[in-house]
Image (spheres, rainbow, N blue to C red):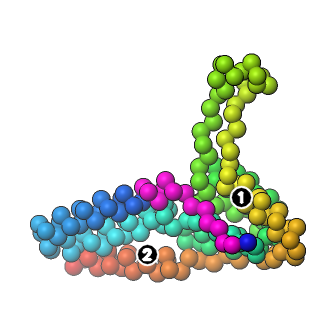
């Protein structure tokens, strides 16, 4: 099985729009007042880093061996054998028998559920029936999990580690912002 990626596209689009607006504001500031531009760069980049951490950085990747859930500041690597269930509340949740559950921030939102139109109610099972809102992300993970269980001896390891590149970049931006505000 190749590596697959699940990412919330609307969140990524919102972050890109925010980055474009911030870039436009910085360019406008650079053309008008260079000292103010120097003081504004680090805080704007820190704000973009924080938004990117929540909107653009989270991702779910999976292949034949494992599931990788990258949440803000934490990366979870879960072998398929360690998974007890895949479900959803507001986000995708992976129940791991070693550590409880892992909530994936990168899961796409469900489509809005709509009531069945009146003309179709005569064919439906009842007047209160609601059309299903296909959860393709959960279905993809469930199929991959089932294939890994059937395919052989899946890994049972679960590893949590900090997202070091994001942490280092955030620390550098905080230091730069503090220095820019004090000078």
Question: What residue is at 42 percent from the left and 60 percent from the top?
Answer: 15
Q: Position of residue 138 (x, y in %)?
A: 70, 54
- Please tell me whether residue 53 is drawn above or below residue 124 in the rendered image: below
- Circle 2 residues within 10 Å: few <14, some 14–19, many ≥20: some
Which residue is nearer to you in this view: 73 or 115?
115
Image vertical order of residue 50 relative to residue 172, above or below: above
C-alpha span from label 2 to label 1: 33 Å
Is residue 157 on the magenta stretch? no
Extent of the magenta region: 2-14
- The residue positioned farthest toward the left in the image shown: 32
Residue carrying label 2: 170
What is the secondary structure assignment of the residue under circle 1?
helix
Query: Which residue is painted at 69% across and 72% down in the image?
Result: 2
**Can you give x and y, in whole percent of width and height, for residue 52 in the image?**
45, 65
Quarter that holds the N terminus: bottom right
Q: Residues within 10 Å of mark 1 (few under 14, many from 20)?
A: some
Q: Write down the residue under mark 1.
A: 140
Residue 97 in view (yes/no): no
């Amino acid at each position: 099985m190749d590596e697959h990626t699940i990412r919330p596209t609307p969140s990524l689009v919102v972050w890109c729009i925010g980055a474009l607006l911030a870039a436009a504001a910085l360019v406008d500031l650079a053309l008008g007042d260079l000292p103010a531009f120097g003081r504004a760069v680090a805080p704007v980049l820190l704000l973009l880093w924080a938004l990117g951490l929540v909107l653009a950085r989270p991702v779910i990747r999976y292949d034949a061996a494992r599931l990788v859930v990258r949440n803000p500041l934490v990366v979870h690597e879960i072998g398929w054998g360690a998974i007890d269930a895949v479900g959803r509340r507001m986000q995708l949740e992976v129940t791991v028998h070693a550590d409880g559950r892992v909530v994936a921030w990168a899961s796409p939102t469900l489509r809005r559920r709509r009531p069945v139109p009146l003309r179709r109610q005569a064919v439906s099972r009842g007047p209160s029936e609601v059309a299903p809102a296909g959860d393709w992300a959960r279905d993809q993970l469930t199929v991959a999990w089932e294939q890994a269980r059937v395919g052989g001896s899946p890994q049972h390891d679960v590893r949590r580690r900090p997202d070091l590149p994001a942490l280092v970049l955030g620390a550098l931006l905080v230091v730069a912002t503090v220095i820019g505000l004090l000078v």
